[in-house]
Image (cartoon, rainbow, N blue to C red):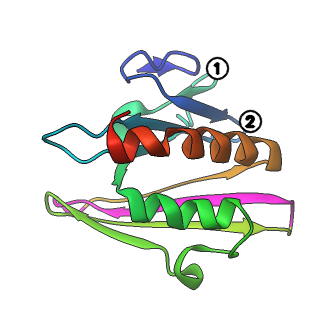
Amino acid sequence: METMNDNTHRRPALSFYHANGKGTGSALTVALEKATADCDGRLLVGLAPQESDAAFPRFDWPREVCVSLGVVDVCLLLQVLRGETESVADGKGLYIVRDGDRIRLCFRHMVEPINGYSLDVYALLSGGEERRVGIVLSSAEALGLCAAVEGGMAAMCFGA
């Protein structure tokens, strides 16, 4: 298991760690893969649940749910972050099928009970296991995520 600040198992990524005393927190990592001549660029989004039985906040990286998003999917997230829409697909989210896994990613702006952005990932894995991991980003965290993703769009599209 990794400690809260040890995500060395990943490429350079923007990370947010939201641990809590109940052990129901989560960690979000967002990494960009540049486009190449052989492969389209993508945004890798991972959500890992907090370990509920750890004495100190730790995240269960082996149970992380990872989603690979293409350019149009990323633009749908950016529309929410920019305030152009309140949620992705009117709250229905994005549906992703990968290697027998079925994943739904929901992203929305929220004002109650706090102002922020809610990201929830629901996964039905090929072995029948169900996972749900979510995180609420503050407005400041969302602004940083928006700026980082917007800044990486050229590399994601053109490999710049």
Q: Is residue 112 above or below residue 64?
A: below
Q: How many marks?
A: 2
Which x, y percent locates residue 86?
70, 75
Q: Is residue 95 above or below residue 125?
A: below
Q: Is residue 133 visible?
A: yes
Neighbours of disc 1 within 10 Å: few (<14), some (14-19), many (20+): some
Q: Nearer the viewer, residue 108 or 19?
A: 108
Q: Which residues are magenta?
A: 113-128
Give yes or no for residue 117 being in the magenta stretch: yes
Which x, y percent locates residue 106?
53, 68
Q: Is residue 43 visible?
A: no
Q: Which residue is mark 1?
A: 56
Q: Are marks 2 and 1 in contact (CB under 8 Å)?
A: no
Q: Earlier in the sequence, mark 2 or mark 1?
A: 2
Badge 1 marks a residue whose secondary structure is loop
Identify the amino acid type marked 2: Gly
Q: Residue shown at 49%/74% (left/top)?
A: 93
Q: Residue shown at 55%/44% (left/top)?
A: 149
Q: Residue furthest bottom?
A: 90
Give yes or no for residue 12 being in the magenta stretch: no
Identify the amino acid type marked 1: Phe
Which x, y percent locates residue 110?
77, 68
Judge left or right: residue 153 versus residue 141: left
Q: Which residue is mark 2?
A: 21
